[in-house]
Amino acid sequence: MLLLNPGPVTLSERVRQSLLQTDLCHRESEFFDLQDEARERLLGVYGLAPAQWSAVLMTGSGTAALESMIAGLVPAQGKLLIVQNGVYGERIAQIAAQYGIGHAVVRHEWMEAPDLARLDAALGADPAITHVAVIHHETTTGRLNDIAGIDALCQQHGKRLLVDAVSSFGAEAIDFGGNIDAVAATANKCLHGVPGAAFVIARRDALANAASRTYYLDIARLAKLQDQRNTPFTPSVHAYYALVEALREHAEEGGWQGRHQRYAALAEEVRSGLAALGIEALWPAAQSSVVLRAYKLPAGVSYEQLHDGLKARGFVIYAGQGGLSSQLFRISTMGALHAADMHRLVAGFRELLGK
Ligand SMILES: *Cc1c(COP(=O)(O)O)cnc(C)c1O
């Protein structure tokens, strides 16, 4: 079965085999060697200097990393402005509310791109705001949000930026040279590891001012202990094995740029193949990530029909979220997938649509 949902992904054989390594006690030096390699390689994905940045690992899914970032890196008296245009932007607002963090939301329809003029006005109107949070790739619709434009506004207004890059880290460009304080992501999306390991790439000076609102996900404590080749709790050792092997593979395949090109080619195979069958992409390529594309359901065909027919042919596609489920379906090209798989997928659509 090939997974075309946005994570967990179809594993390469190499990453799958990495799970079968020797059992490790997480208090032995072998585990800390593994943890160190994971942390170094994560910074290496975007060429970040360990003197300024820290890769903070945790056991959990992408949401754990997000929660750790939001609960830790908005300081005690800080206020967060959340740019929201999909399910994951809503999730950040829920996390802020849960921790009693002062926050405001610049709300958009799920189909809209972030409106930089509205964001500019919101930043100008409320001097209490210290941080902005945004989703890089809003997996809800496949839209790639303009984090460079948002970062430029943060620089202009003197605000720090926190980014949910859960479904873009390792495959889309991220410029860490501006006001980004941290980026949250996970092992099992564009990096092609298994679920269970997540991480935040954080500036060390932001970690120094972190708040301690959560016990298990306390980012400053995790960072400090990991720097000391230590860990507060039992990590998902096997997920770390897979993450390190996936990061080696990622580097050998040309880093984030190599992965970007690979996804772009696969996504274009699918887009052009489906276009020939009359199935339209939701966005032009320039507004979409290369990681996932949303398509309009063809008239007279339900998502369930498509899903079940493709599953019988060996592919798991993904529904639209919430109110979009009756209008859209989504196809992610993350994971160990190849052009031949995409040809078979398009052939499957052709058969199902009787074309
Ligand atoms: C997948 C995803 C998450 C988190 O998902 P988990 O199920 O917790 O791994 C968060 N944000 C975005 C943009 C995502 O795509």
Image (cartoon, helix red, strand yellow):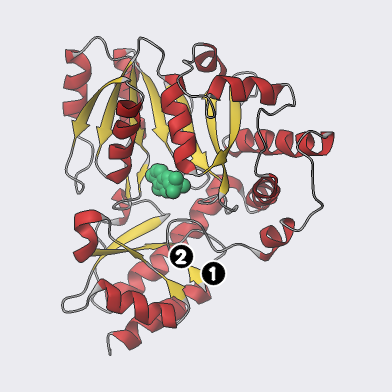
Q: Which residue is at a point 30% across and 51% down the rendered structure image?
A: 140
Q: Which residue is at a point 36% across and 78% down the rendered structure image?
A: 308
From the viewer's perspective, is residue 68 above or below residue 288?
A: above
199 vs 173, left or right, is right
Q: Residues within 10 Å of mark 2 (few under 14, many from 20)?
A: many
Q: Is residue 167 visible?
A: no
Asked whether mark 2 and ligand 1 are closer than 8 Å, the reply comes as no
The image shows residue 108 at horizontal and vertical percentages of 18, 39
> Within the image, what quadrant is residue 158 found in?
top left
Residue holding disc 2: 266
165 vs 299, left or right, is right
Front-most of residues 329 and 72:
72
Residue holding disc 1: 338
Mark 1 belongs to which amino acid?
A: His
The disc, 1 or 2, on the residue closer to the chain's N-terminal end is 2
Q: Residues within 10 Å of mark 1 (few under 14, many from 20)?
A: few
Q: Which residue is at a point 76% across and 58% down the rendered structure image?
A: 20
The image shows residue 309 at horizontal and vertical percentages of 36, 82
Asked whether mark 1 and ligand 1 are closer than 8 Å, the reply comes as no
Q: Are marks 1 and 2 in contact (CB under 8 Å)?
A: yes
Residue 321's label in the rendered image is none
From the viewer's perspective, is residue 76 above or below residue 274?
A: above
216 vs 349, left or right, is right
